[in-house]
Structures are given as structure tokens and as C-alpha cells.
Image (tube, helix red, strand yellow):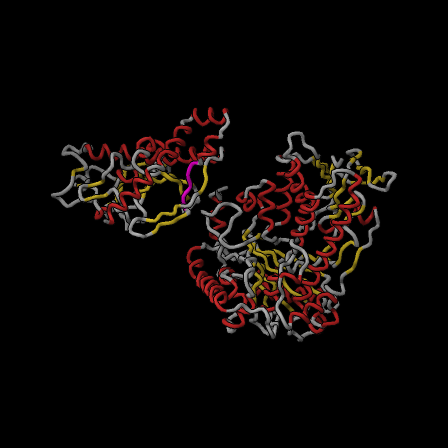
Amino acid sequence: MIKNIVIVGGGAAGWLTAGILAANYAKADNRAVSITLVESPDINTIGVGEGTWPTMRMTLSQIGVSETEFLRCCNASFKQGSKFVNWSHGEGGDAYYHPFTIPQAYNETNFHALWQRHFSNSAYDAVANPQAAICELSCAPKNITVPEYAGVLNYGYHLDAGKFGDLLKRHCTEKLGVRHVSDNVIQVVAAEDESIAYLKTEKSGDIHGDLFVDCSGTHCLLLGEHYNIPFKDCRQYSINDTALATQVPYDNQNSPIASATIATAHSAGWTWDIGLSSRRGVGYVYSSQHISDDDAEKELRAYIGSSVESSVAEQLSVRKIKIRAGHREKFWHRNCVAVGMAAGFIEPLEASALALVELSAKFIRDELPMSSSTIPLVEKRFNTTFSYRWEKIIEFLKLHYLISQRRDTAYWCEVSDPASAPDGLKELLELWKFRPPYHHDLLHTEEIFPSASYQYVLYGMGFETSADMKAPEGNSEQKFLRQVRESIQQAEKLSGSLPSNRALLQTIEKHELQKI
Amino acid sequence: MSNIKILNNKEHAGLRINTEKKSEYGDNIGGAIVFPTEILEAHKEYPIFFQKSQDTGAFQAVALFGFRQDENLFLTNSGWQAEYIPAIVQREPFLIGLQENASTGEKTPVVSVNLNSPRIAKPEEGETVFLEGGESSPLLVEATRQLDIVHDGFGASVKMFEKFLAHDLMESFTLDIEFNDGSKYGTSMYYTISQDKLYELSAESITELHSGGYLQLAYLILASSSNLKRLINRRNALAK
């Protein structure tokens, strides 16, 4: 029986995993499974990864955190997708959205064909649904009368990762019965069968467990240091190896808060721009092979200087983070499973970090082996699933570069070179020249990026799919056409009824979102 | 535009108020907020549902008079045909203002009046607010009583909804009505007491709710929904 789960590491990954597991197993009257989280008091968490997917709403709701408390504690704001600027041509002005809401009628018909036939003069994202227009206005995805975790439009969050970890820690220890040990692990002790028996700590004695979750970040204490599971380097597909991160104050307390992550392409990488309620988080992710740190910093400050006083932009302190793109060759080994940066890391272009933590923790929760004998089966399933997910994330991120028309720097020539793409992606791109991506291109039901995401990126960047064999015909075409037209008209109505992101967050500072 | 002044018997000595209920005085309203102390009376006349404030998202109980913002099916040529009219309507054109003490900064509630209200009467019409000696007229005494209901009502409402929500007694529902003339009305903005959840309350919950009077309120509000049929009948009768 798995009775004791031990989590090593207390960043957002550790506490989120603890929360997801404890919310499920703490419900039973006699705590069927106990959860201990051991966290070093000497190690600071990295605290990047400030964007989430819409899945975070369900996750937080299941953990039992109120949305009002979450928004207030984490300086969080509403995120409705990503805006990609200068990725296609880079001459200034090209931009498209990858919103969280899938295109209107997408699951019932061939939306791409409808768009091509009837709206080919309009941008794909503008025809898909009102979300891109709403984001452009910095509107919130809901108003104060909509219950917590529900939206008029689909949304996730921008959040302060440090504060998020603190909130989850408080909630896990006070409400969900998670035992918190603040101590350094000094030795991992194996049992005869090479599974982990217990952890020796400096002051808190031995911590025994049946299942160990490695959330120790890049230290990868259990899976890496103890088990020596090799790290699979993915630099060939993701050459950005450095990030410069900073925090930018708002001009004043009424400055608009963007409702999407703004990812702007630059000479040797891209900047993220994430609007929290309290400040912006901005950073430049780049390839150190193609630009010096000093020049990258200049580009970053110039970007920030376009939206705040240049004197403010010059004074911001900038933190350098090394990125090692890749993941462990396997994530689950014996009675140890790695979650978060211990499992792998990739640039935050589509904010996949926290989403992968949620998926991993939910997999562990749902398939928790009830006896030691089934551990190898779950191990195999977990590794197959997450190897596939990593492969798909790497492919999807690479797609953003591969179809760019930019050739203005050596960097863009290199990242857009077909030879630099994984074979799987190259094959799909060949197919997509003749038909759009659709559901069958992807194997899993819980696909990490649905086919609609591929369409948003491909057609946002001007990719051309020539023939389209599966166009809707006759009456059904008229029906879907009407739906799409209505949805476009809805944008105007929504922009009148939705408050700004800033205004709704200010209201939530004073008043609570209702549970119903 | 409102023109709100603190009421006093010198400045407003000659003030007169129209007391009849008429559209031109602003009584053509589709519903009004009701407070817990009013529900015992109001539930006999009107369907009482809950809705959220557009500004704060907080729940408030509302009595329905009609199916449009400006439709009051109780309002006829001979006045408002009901035994009970909510205090928030009855107090018009008076309201509670806050007067700040210049030295202490303390704010105290004071009776104020909206001088731009259509209820403000011409010199020869309506009823007086102050008697000749400057004392409050019966009209003002009554309006002040209604203002007290409103003033105490907001806090009482907050407590009532805290209890209802804590015991998970509320649910949203969809109103979907087709009138005899073929016209339709639909909305999902309202919430009500869930009969199932009310019946499933544990003994402890019942005791707790009963001790504050909330159990009775829940049953009264649930019972008030039968007035919806009568309101629809009023609407159908009107169309003939």
C-alpha cells in the first residue's frame, strides 16, 4: 500500500503537487495517505513561470482555494492567451493572438475552410472568436457577477510565482494536513530493491515514504543525483539558453493590465511581458551564441523603454537565468517521480511549466499505485505519457520559429532552418501545406496543445494551406457561417459589457467573487 | 440628476410630496430590493429571488413586479395594487445621507431628500413634510420608519446571505416564460433557495439556521415563488 508520499522541494511545483494530492486523499475520514513535504530552508526558489493555462482554474477549485483569495494573495491577473509580436516578418507591426478559446464551431466543422472561403481578408484570430479583440482592449474575461472560476471567455492567470508558492504552502499545511519539514536532505537511503527507503535530514531525522516526488528543481536530488537518470539535452531544437528577467512598475495605479502574455520577437530571441496586478514581469530569452549579455540587456531596456520613461527602464535591476532546454530521459523510476523543473525545462514561450506540473500531479493522483507491485506499470505509463508530452511541447514551440519569414539576423536564419526541426514536426508541416491541422494529427485525448493551437500559430503567421478537401457543404456551411458571423458581432457587445482587467481586479480587492 | 440635500425644517419648511403611486413618479419599476425584515410581508405578494449587484457581485433579495425594467404589473390607474410595498420604494424621495462632524470627523446618518425627484410636489399639491410648528408630519414619520428598515436592512441582508451560502442553500435557475400573446421572457440572472438542499439540511444546521430566524426566511422565500404564476397571470390579463 502507498501510505506515505514524500515530496522533496517546496517551490510552486512542490506545493502544487502537494495540494493536488492532499485535496484528494485528505478527504477520506482517516487520511488514507499522508503527505510530507521537505523543503530546504537554504535554497531560494527560481520563481519564474508567471503564466498559467485555463486548467489552473479547475486545479485551484479542486484544491479548495477561493479565486478571490488566490487573486489577492498572488497579485494575479486574468490571462486570455498570448500575443505574438514581430514573429512573422519582424519589420514592426506584425502580430497575432493565440487565445485560450478555440475558434467558433471548431469541433463541428472545418473552420479553416470557412475562414478561407468567406473571410480571407481578415486575420484568422479576428474571425475565430471575440477573444483577440477583447485582449486588444485589455478587458477582463468576466465581470463581478460571474461566479468564481467561471468565465464569459476562457482564461488562465498571470501570477507572482513566489507568492503563489506561499499561498499553497499555507493552504496545504493549514487546511489539507500536509506535513511540512523545513530541513536539508543530506542522504537518500535505498532499500534492497533499489527503491528509495527514506531520506536522512540534518535535524529532523529520517523521513520514510512509499513514493517520493522529486520537486527539487534543477538540483534534481532524487532522480538525477541519486538515480543518475540522464538529462536529455534539447538544445538543438530550442537554442535560447539565457534569460534576463526584471520587474517593471506600472506608470500609475490605473495603467491598463494586459489580458494576454505579450511575446515580442527580437534580434536573437524574444521578450515575455506579463502584467500582474502590482507590476509587470518582463524578460528577454535569447541565444548566447548570437548576442552578448550586454547587447541583450540593451535590447531588453529599449523594449521596456517603449512603454515607460526611459530613465525608469535604465534603472531596473536585471537578473540573469541560465536555461538548459531538455528533460530527464525518464521521469518515473522505481518509487520516485520527478515533477516541475526536476523533470525538465523549456523556454516559457507557451507557459507550459505550471501546466505540466498540474498534469503530472493529476496523473500521480489518478493512477496512484495502491500496491508496490503495480508501481512498475504506473511507472511505464507515466514515462510513455510524459515523454510524448515533452516531445509535443518541443515541437509546438519550435513551430513558432520554423515558419517565421524573418531572416534579418543569423539567429533567425538558424531557428527557421528546416534542418533544425524535429522529424515529426517536419512531416506534419508537409501535411499542413495541403490540409489544416485537425484532431487526428494528435494521438491523445488530453493533448497538451490541441490542434486549434497549431492553427492559431500557423495561420497567425501567414502559413498557407493550399487545397482543403474537407470543406463543409450546403446547409451546414450556411449554419456555421452564421455562427461565425454572430460570434464576430459578439465582440462589440462584449467590449461594452466587460470591465477592464484592471477594473475587475480592483473590484475584487474590495468585494468577493461568489462561489455560485 | 439627483439633487440631494440634508433635510431640515427651516429650509424645507414648505416642502410637499406626492404620495400616490404613478408611473410619472417613477413607480414603473420591474422590481425592488427587499430586506430580511420585509420578507414576512413581501412574500405574500411578490416572487422573491436573489440577484447579484452589478457593482460588487454581492447577493441581494429582490421582489419582482414585472418582466421588464419598466414594467410594474401592480401599478394601475388606482394605484399600487398590493398590501405591502417594499421600503426602498416607500421611502422615496427621502434617503439616508451621511453628515460629517466638522470637529470629530465622525459620520452620522441623517435624513436627506432628493429635490429633483418627480415626487416633489407643486405648492398646492401633495402632502406636507413639516407641520406648521416645524414638527415632522405623519408622512415624514412614516418615511423615516421606512428609511430605518433600509438602513438596518443592508447589514441584515449580508448576514442572511452568509448563512444561506454557508449552508449551500442557494442555486441559480433559468426563467423561461411564454405569455399568452406569444411573447417570451427568459433570464438566468436569478438565484433562489434550493428546495432539495433545504429538505436535506442536517439537524444541527436546522437548529443553527432557526436560531437566527433564517430557516423561516428560507421557507418564506421558497414559498414566494408561487407568486410567479400570479405575476404571469397579471401580465396575460394586461395583454387582452
- When asked about the image quadrant of residue A203, the answer is top right
Magenta span of residues = B189-193
Q: Is residue A236 above or below residue B62?
A: below
- When asked about the image quadrant of residue A320, the answer is bottom right
Query: Who is closer to the viewer here, A138 or B174?
Result: B174
| Residue B169 in view in this figure | yes
| Residue A501 in view in this figure | no
Secondary structure mostly seen in the magenta stretch = strand
Q: Is residue A200 above or below residue A456?
A: above
In this rendering, position of residue A468 left or right of residue A417: left
Q: Residue at x 42, y 26 (%)?
A: B212
Q: Position of residue A263 (x, y in %)?
A: 61, 63
Q: Position of residue A143 (x, y in %)?
A: 46, 50
- When asked about the image quadrant of residue B114, the answer is top left
Q: Quadrant of the N terminus of chain A?
A: top right
Q: Residue at x 15, y 46 (%)?
A: B122
Query: Who is closer to the viewer here, A162 or A309?
Result: A162
Q: Position of residue A401 (x, y in %)?
A: 67, 68
Q: Position of residue B121 (x, y in %)?
A: 17, 44
Query: Who is closer to the viewer here, A338 or A453?
Result: A453
Please tell me whether residue A199 belongs to the stretch shown in magenta. Answer: no
Q: Is residue B104 above or below residue A95?
A: above
In this rendering, position of residue A458 left or right of residue B54: right
